[in-house]
């Protein structure tokens, strides 16, 4: 099961890298590298904590899934659910972007 979760998470990260600008893709790849673990975990936890206070002007609820994505890289039981959620969100984003593009034609 953990191997499937890792595959889902890897596919989710690959999709994010495709959908984001080059600069963001490089940051994602760097954060995924094994040497970045000591930055990835605290940053993920900070983003989750910031997302909890998403009602404040500077913080946003969108920090929660981003933080979970970072934390899931190192916590096996989160990899499957977070990977599947990210893949689902990516599919919805691509479909929405396509509808906007088709509407402007």
Image: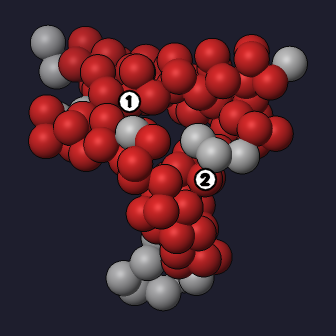
Verify CB contact (< 8 Å) between mark 2 and mark 1.
Answer: no
Residue under circle 1? 16
Query: Hey, which quadrant is residue 51 in on the image?
Result: bottom right
Characterize the local packing of mark 2: few (<14), some (14-19) or many (20 or more) Cα atoms within 10 angstroms.
Answer: many
Query: Hey, which quadrant is residue 26 in on the image?
Result: top left
Q: For residue 9, say whether it is visible.
A: yes
Q: Quadrant of the C terminus?
A: top left
In this view, 52 is above or below 102: below
Label 1, secondary structure: give it.
helix
Q: Would residue 57 appear left or right of 91 to someone viewing this image?
A: left
Find residue 58 and report its horizontal and vertical position in percent: 36, 82
In this view, 58 is above or below 63: below
Q: For residue 63, say whether it is visible.
A: no
Q: Residue furthest bottom?
A: 56
In this view, 44 is above or below 12: below
> Which residue is located at x 30 percent, y 43 percent?
30
Mark before the other along the chain sequence, 2 or 1: 1
Camera-side residue of 96 and 84: 84
Residue under circle 2? 71
> Which residue is located at x 59 percent, y 69 percent?
45
Q: Report, in whole angstroms, how far the alpha carbon at label 2 lies from the one at label 1.
A: 16 Å
Camera-side residue of 103 and 34: 34
> Which residue is located at x 13 percent, y 41 percent?
23
Label 2, secondary structure: give it.
helix
Q: Would residue 88 appear left or right of 35 to someone viewing this image?
A: right
Find residue 43 and report its horizontal and vertical position in percent: 46, 67
Foreground tag (2 vs 1): 2
Q: Would residue 2 appear left or right of 32 to someone viewing this image?
A: right
Characterize the local packing of mark 1: few (<14), some (14-19) or many (20 or more) Cα atoms within 10 angstroms.
Answer: some
């Amino acid at each position: 099961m953990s191997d499937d979760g890792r595959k889902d998470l890897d596919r989710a990260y690959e999709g994010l890298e495709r959908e984001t600008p080059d600069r963001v893709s490089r940051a994602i790849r760097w954060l995924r590298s094994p040497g970045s673990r000591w930055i990835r975990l605290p940053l993920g936890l900070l983003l989750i904590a910031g997302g909890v206070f998403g009602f404040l002007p500077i913080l946003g609820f969108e920090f929660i899934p981003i933080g979970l994505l970072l934390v899931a890289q190192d916590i096996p039981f989160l990899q499957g659910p977070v990977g599947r959620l990210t893949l689902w969100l990516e599919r919805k984003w691509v479909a929405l972007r396509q509808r906007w593009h088709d509407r402007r034609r």
